[in-house]
Image (cartoon, grey):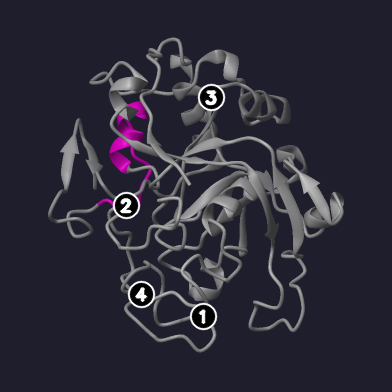
Amino acid sequence: MKRISVVIALFTLTSCGFEAGQPSTSLSTTAEIFSEYDFAIIEAGSFFMGSQGEREDEGEDHFNEQRHYVTLTKDFLMLKTELTQQQWYDIMGTNPSRTVSSGDCPEEYKVIDGIELCPSHPVDFVLRDDVHGFLNVLNPSHCGDQSTEEGFNKARRTSGCYRLPTEAEWEYAARAGTTTPFNSGYQILASKVNFDGRRPYRNGPSGVFRDTTVPVGSLDNANAWGLYDMHGNVSEHVADGVFVNAYEIGGDHVVDPYYHANRDEGHFYGLRGGSYTWGGDHCRSASRLFELYSFAQQDSGIRLVQTL
């Protein structure tokens, strides 16, 4: 598996759709914001997606985790950590996060133009509308409006476009070649993963409940791709909608799946990875969480993907 640092092309925020948000005036290009951040290249391949009897309350496949074979045909880049509050602020000039007081991050708390920041903590409490607005500001206009099926597919086809991962891309990246409930094996430890350690997976060891986020990449939990916090910390938005039968649509073997959620029909959008508020069961690689378009969970964040 290869890992690379990516130097982002110089797109000015004006060309990236200035009207879609209120970007900070302190930085003028995405290169200035992202050139120093490390992305991992996730190589194309095939894997078994979903679970097989992992749920404590299920003797067989859980209804929305049906195990099936997936092939991803294209490499892509994924940010090694969840997007931070500082990175969000640098693009948008705002901070939607609830984990943002001096008590949450006494070692780095700061206020810029009236906006409170825990700079290295993940951005949280992110509405789906806000995610799309962020992407519209970050990307050049030819990447499309990712709130639409057409726009997302355009971003997925166009080199250089930032976007959310599909559910399949997220799980493939999280597993990093593993078939166990977690990329670390059959259990996670609260000393290495920020989850509610009072509620371990099955008969796992109990641990600390931090009741807050931690700085991204601060715990020793990188997987084989070099991705941190794929289990816990904040739940990560994925591009797909979450349907009970989504895994059955393409049959036993699907290629580059993406299941668009129709906002007007009240479909749910997907979240992956669990968070500091969830027990171990919901932090598994296969676990699927969801939210309504107009609702943000306090622990919801994002991890960027870039199309190659």
- Measured Cα–Cα span from mark 4 to mark 1: 11 Å
What's under tag 3, amino acid-wise? Cys
Query: Which region is colored magenta?
Result: 85-100
The residue to which callout 4 is attached is 190
Residue 17 at x, y = what percent?
48, 15
The residue to which callout 2 is attached is 216
- Measured Cα–Cα span from mark 2 to mark 4: 15 Å
- Measured Cα–Cα span from mark 3 to mark 2: 23 Å
What's under tag 1, amino acid-wise? Tyr
The residue to which callout 3 is attached is 161
For residue 83: magenta? no
Marks 3 and 2 in Cβ contact (< 8 Å): no
What's under tag 4, amino acid-wise? Ala
Residue 158 is left or right of residue 184, and the answer is right
For residue 86: magenta? yes
Q: Secondary structure at mark 2?
A: loop
Closer to the chain start, of discs 1 and 2, is 1
For label 4, count other residues whose C-alpha is less than 10 Å away and answer few (under 14), some (14-19) or many (20+): many
Q: Secondary structure at mark 1?
A: loop
- Measured Cα–Cα span from mark 4 to mark 3: 35 Å
Residue 126 is left or right of residue 128, and the answer is left
Quarter occupied by the C terminus: top right
For label 3, count other residues whose C-alpha is less than 10 Å away and answer few (under 14), some (14-19) or many (20+): many
Determine if residue 221 is in view.
yes
- Measured Cα–Cα span from mark 1 to mark 2: 23 Å
Q: Secondary structure at mark 4?
A: loop
The residue to which callout 1 is attached is 201
Marks 1 and 2 in Cβ contact (< 8 Å): no
Q: Secondary structure at mark 3?
A: loop
